[in-house]
Image (cartoon, helix red, strand yellow):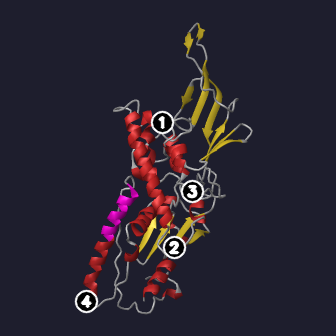
Amino acid sequence: MTAETPAGGQVPRGCFNLKYEVWVHPYNWTDDNANSARRLGDTVAAAANSMRRFERLGYRTLKPILVTHSMGGLVARAYTQLHGGGGDVHGVIHGAMPTDGSPATYKRMRAGFEGVESQVLGRNQSESTATAGNLPGPLELLPNGRHRSVNGTTNWLRGTGQGGGRLWARPAANPYGEIYVNQADWWRLIYRQYLDPDGDPDGRSAFRQSRTQIIAAASYHSRLGSSGYHPNTRMFYAADRGHPCWDHIEWRQTSRVDTPSNAQPQRNDENGTVEWGRWSDPVYTPYGANPPVFIADTRYEIQEPDAPGDGTVHAGSGKYVSGPMSVPTRNGFVHQSAFDLGEARRFVSEWLFAMVQEQL
């Protein structure tokens, strides 16, 4: 306990002989969260065994309290709710958890990652599909069947015409079939030829493997959602507009015709723009021929994020959490540095203090 704790820096009564340790659990975010949860169970068991040496010396120890960041919250929930670890920990504190997935994952698979992540996971659709499309962890970060945007809507993938009118919205019911394994519509998640361009240029075999991963992600989402949360859970999230997020993805028509013609050539820049149109004839000049130019009749572009959040996880991820205490911070934060915010540290300090008191 530190001077930042509630009650003027006083520690709870009974803490004079209390011993505690802080353990850090690393996990591979590309792996299945259920697998990562099993390894978290090993860490919790190792921590409990470590504390027994203090008990033999007459000190008092308490049950562990899990503190998570981002996807780590999904790992901790899988551990407590799916692998029977709930009774081994006293409580769980989540920060910036993508509770029901993030539309940003769709955007990044269709248009590339931003910043330093683009160097590892892909700068465009083909590179991002070859990585994230084959990995369980990123696929489990896609919006699941319970996902809601900040305003409560569930159809988070939308097409709008030039005048701003809604042309279509998905999912109507099932994001896995309608978006993730869909191979018919141009706005689908997976273009199979990008999954393994060297080993399987057509992508048929690679897509069967990716589809298996998506079906497994759907099963994981279903099991985790129906199990809810550890009964003693706290959570904080960002709800300001200083770091806008994608709580939905809008493909907006920015050319002349709203409905593309399948008979026309398609051009995809792999960074969030898809066009249908025609190539102009070469223009010959005394200095040579100018190359053909693509003239778009229909153009759809992914729009910039505009929802409140932390730049990665939108506010709906905390707003619609039921059961545990879930509170927004008054001041915003950047997703990766959520725990650098003084307000977030105060929340965590108060919650830890309360959870210690509950065990004394």
Tell me which segment is drawn in magenta.
Answer: 32-43
First in residue order: circle 3 vs circle 1:
3
The quarter holding residue 186 reads top right
Left or right, 61 with reference to 141 = left
Total marks placed:
4
Q: Are marks 3 and 4 in contact (CB under 8 Å)?
A: no
| Residue count near mark 4 (Cα–Cα under 10 Å), binned few <14, some 14–19, many ≥20 | few
Give the CA distance from mark 2 to mark 1. 39 Å
Task: Tell me the amino acid under the disc marked 4.
Answer: Leu
CA distance separating discs 2 and 3: 20 Å
Of all residues, the one furthest to the right in this rendering is 163
User: Label 2, label 4: how many angstroms apart (C-alpha)?
Assistant: 33 Å
Quadrant location, the C terminus: bottom left
Q: Earlier in the sequence, mark 4 or mark 1?
A: 4
Q: Which residue is mark 2?
A: 234
Describe the element under mark 1 as helix, strand or loop.
loop
**Which mark is drawn over residue 147?**
3
Verify CB contact (< 8 Å) between mark 3 and mark 1: no
Question: Mark 3 against mark 4, which lies toward the viewer?
Answer: 3
The correct choice, above or below, for 257 with respect to 334 in the image is above
